Structure formats: structure tokens, C-alpha cells
Amino acid sequence: MGLDRWYQLYHHKRMRNTRPISWIKAARKDFQKFPKEAQEIVLDALTIAAEGAKSSLTKPFKGMGSGVFEIALPFKGDAYRTIDLLHKSRQNRIK
């Protein structure tokens, strides 16, 4: 099952009034290279952010200003990172 279809099913089963996650094309390609288990964990963290909360994996990304967060996942001896840029309306809900 492709990532898009998996995410649609996952999103439908688990989410409530969740904003869709928008991807930069190159970032999405890099994300698809993550191990499947790491993708699931990072998608959970992104989903939590899309619902207006903050995952325990999410930390402010220093030097980039408010609304920019890093999701850093140590996983099986490697580290996988994503950057989440919050839309202004989501910033207000998280504070």
C-alpha cells in the first residue's frame, strides 16, 4: 500500500477535525526513505501537531523563530528528523 493511501486510511480512522499535512516535494521523498516504523511514529507526531497539540518528540527548532519545530526520532541506532512549520492559526492553539 502506498504512503498516500495508507495515510488516508490512517487519517480517516484516527483523526478528528485535523488539518491536512502539507509536504514540500523533496521532504516527502526523503520521508518515504525512513523505515516504515519510523514513518508511523513521525506521522503520529505530525498528526498531534495538526490537531493543535505538541508531541513529546517535538522541540522548538532553534534559530528559526516561533512556529518552527523539529521532530527528532532516535530509531534503531539512527536519528530521523523532520521540520514542522506551523501555520499562524495552529500556533495560537498550541500555546
Image: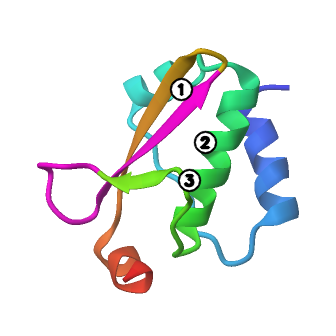
Dot 2: what SS?
Answer: helix
12 vs 33, left or right, is right
In the rendered image, residue 94, in percent from the top left (x then y), is placed at 43, 79
Q: Which residue is mark 1?
A: 31
Could you tell me the amino acid type at mark 1? Phe
Magenta stretch contains residue 63:
yes
Position of the C terminus, as image quadrant, is bottom left
The residue sitting at 44% across, 32% down in the picture is 81
Indicate the secondary structure of the residue bearing disc 3: helix
Q: Examine the structure image and report whether residue 93 is included in the region drawn in magenta.
A: no
* Label of residue 80 in the image: none
- Would you name the residue on which mark 3 appears? 46
Q: Is residue 89 above or below residue 86?
A: below
3D distance between C-alphas at marks 2 and 1: 9 Å
Please indicate whether residue 64 sits to the left or right of residue 12 in the image. Answer: left
Image x and y of residue 16, in percent: 74, 76
**From which residue to which does the magenta span run?**
61-75
Residue 25 falls in which quadrant of the image? top left
